[in-house]
Image: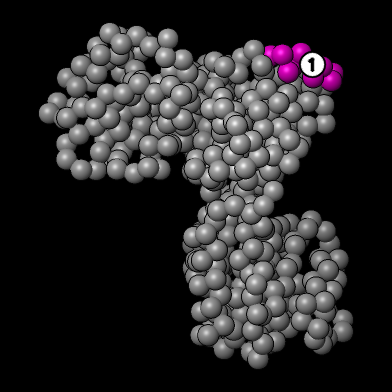
Amino acid sequence: MKFYNRENEIAELKRICNLSYTQNSRMTVVTGRRRIGKTSLIKKAFEDSDEPMLYFFTGRKAEAALVDDFVREVHSTLHGYVPEGLKSVTGVLKHLFELAKTTKFTLVIDEFQEFMTVNPSVFSDLQNLWDSYRSCTRMNLVLSGSVMSMMRRIFTDAHEPLFGRADNIINLRPFRIKVVKEILKDYNPEYSNDDLLALYSITGGIPKYIELFCDNGHVTVESMLCFTVSYMSPFIDEGRNLLITEFGRDYGTYFSILLAIAQGHTSQAEITAALGGMAIGGHLDRLENTYNILSKYRPVLSKPGSKNTVRFRICDNFLQFWFRFIERNRSMIEIENHDDLRDIVIRDYPTYSGLTLEKYFRQKLTEEGGFREMGSWWEAKAGKEACEIDIVGIRTEGKSALIAEVKRNARNYDHKAFKAKVEHIKSKILSGYEIESRLYTIDDM
């Protein structure tokens, strides 16, 4: 698949690189979840540079083996002298800083957080080298990593040696909806909105996942669903590979929580009950604030302290899909019953995608702009939801709001019931607002 989008990020990387070469060294951190396209972005940004780029990949291997890899890259790219007998990563870095006194180049260290396993002293050693050499060298240092909790700790925790050293932190996000549409049109010019919804529902705009579908020719809804759960599908173990590195040995509890949420238990009380009464407050907090896998949400315009209305949502579309259909049916995968798993996914997907369609329209409206708050609204009474509205957007200009119902099929829309909801929310929180009410269906994507 060709390279799409990322014009702003490329421009920023080039801007910082120019400052590195014309003034003094700069440190840029590029982070984001696995498969988001960090390495592709970095290589694309510097592919036409007049100055050389060194690329170090930090694999989980002995430090001496990494040093050998790094030295070979220095020889290959800079064609310069490297002292004999270098045994440490710090030694290689010090040599490069010395070179950067007279030579301009970009140094990319990918999966930088893995030094936590290889040799944690690299972080403090790099701090000392950076503080000593930054002002007298012209190195464009780019540090990239996929384990977001560790990267955040390394660069934003005040107790860590590299705190405050990065000149810029670029957090790479999934493709926006218009980019997903552009890619799908390139590979399937006659795509239907059902095809678009499936690509959005499964990938959430993650470039690598989109590439897997497009490059393998799976660009229709049924083909995508079948490919996702087929024998030897690259998606089968993707969720585990993505999360176990983040969670470590305690991953079982986190998986149980995420599985419960994917099955529709969205309040803390419901999740706790689904897990047999297990205390999960700390886990929920870490899933939200450390790992950024969950988002906590409340009805639009509700007060931040209103705990009784808090719900949790898995932010990542792929992980939501993976827990709902793949991890939930892990026993079928273990006995290689992929045919029945495929039938379950095809059977349940229309209902599942109806909820994703709500998220699609909230995201689409947010990306189009004009709102200061976008979400949904519900009212709980005696354990029952008396009223729930799919989309409530508070506009930035004037005292006006958009209230919308989302249905896959317009035939399922009850206009009288929706009008009653609109009048109810007006009386509760939108008194005096000018209201625009809408119905969104799959035809409006």
Viewer-side residue, 88 vs 403: 403
Residue pictured at 79% horizontal, 16% vertical: 339
Residue at x-position 50% and y-position 66%: 12
Q: How many numbered marks, from 0 up?
A: 1
Left or right: residue 28 versus residue 247 is left
Q: Name which residue type carries label 1.
A: Asp
Quarter of the image where one finds residue 304: top left
Q: Nearer the viewer, residue 282 or 255?
A: 255
- Magenta: main secondary structure equals helix
Q: Is residue 266 above or below residue 99?
A: above
Residue 85 location in percent, x, y?
A: 87, 81
Circle 1 sits in a helix, a strand or a loop, which is it? helix
- What residue span does the magenta drawing correspond to? 335-344
Q: Residue at x 49, y 60 (%)?
A: 8
> Is 343 contained in the magenta span?
yes
Instruction: Tell me where residue 301 appears, x and y as whole percent.
Output: 26, 32
Question: Can residue 309 be seen at all in this image of the molecule?
Answer: no
- Residue lying at 73% horizontally and 83% vertically, measured from the top left: 95
Density class for disc 1 (Cα within 10 Å; few <14, some 14-19, many ≥20) is: some
**Residue named by callout 1:** 339
Horizontal relation, residue 401 to residue 197: left or right: left
